Image (cartoon, rainbow, N blue to C red):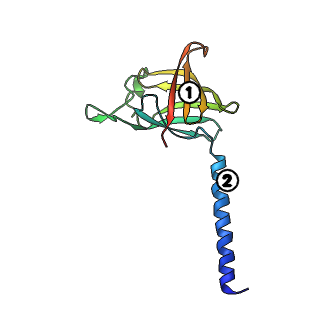
Amino acid sequence: MSLSKKHFARFVLILLTVVSVNIAAKAQTDKIEGLWYNDIKSAKIQISKGTDGKFNGKIIWLKEPLKNGKPKVDDENKDEKLRSRPIIGLHILEGFVHDGDDKYTDGKIYDPKNGKTYSCNITYKGKTLSIRGYIGVSLFGRTTVWERAE
């Protein structure tokens, strides 16, 4: 085999390896993973799968990150010790389990506007997520729609 054929064969092998790894990496990403705008587009939430297989989300961007010239903090939290936590980086979605094709259940959502945590279910709808926060029974709750930010 000539030198140029060897180089071409190596190039093709490397190209196929890169493409295979790329496809495998995309296949491992769940459909709700990624960046999402909240319902009023005042924040971006990064949703990712934890090592325990459950889905979590944290605020990574705020439209208005400052209050009185300082980074916004979790000042509505019931626990005084947590009121100095920055809003950017705050985990607001926790413990969601993939339950069926488009359902994610058994999670919690924290609302930094009122400092309360609610039970929550998520329904994936293509470019949107239907976020249902509730107390006790899902019937008694509120639904907001988040939009993909990518």
Q: Residue 55, position in %: x, y?
A: 60, 35
Q: Quadrant of the N terminus?
A: bottom right
Determine the secondary structure under disc 1: strand
Residue 130 marker: 1
Residue projecting furthest to the right = 1
Instruction: State the image quarter where residue 90 is shown.
Output: top left
Instruction: State the image quarter where residue 132 is shown.
Output: top right
Amino acid type indicated by mark 2: Ala
Residue projecting furthest to the bottom = 2
Q: Dot 2 corresponds to which residue?
A: 24
Q: Which circle's residue, 2 or 1, is located before the other in the chain?
A: 2
Amino acid type indicated by mark 1: Ser
Q: Dot 1 surroundings within 10 Å: few (below 14), some, or many (20 or more)?
A: some
Are dots 2 and 1 in contact, CB under 8 Å?
Answer: no
Q: Residue 33, position in %: x, y?
A: 57, 40
- Residue 140 lies left or right of residue 112; in this view the side is right
Residue projecting furthest to the left = 68
Q: CA distance from mark 2 to mark 1?
A: 28 Å
Determine the secondary structure under disc 2: helix
Looking at the image, which is closer to me, 96 or 2? 2
Q: Nearer the viewer, mark 2 or mark 1?
A: 1
Q: Residue 138, position in %: x, y?
A: 60, 16
Q: Residue 63, position in %: x, y?
A: 36, 35
Q: Dot 2 surroundings within 10 Å: few (below 14), some, or many (20 or more)?
A: few
Q: Residue at point 59% right, 28% down? A: 122
Instruction: State the image quarter where residue 97 is shown.
Output: top right
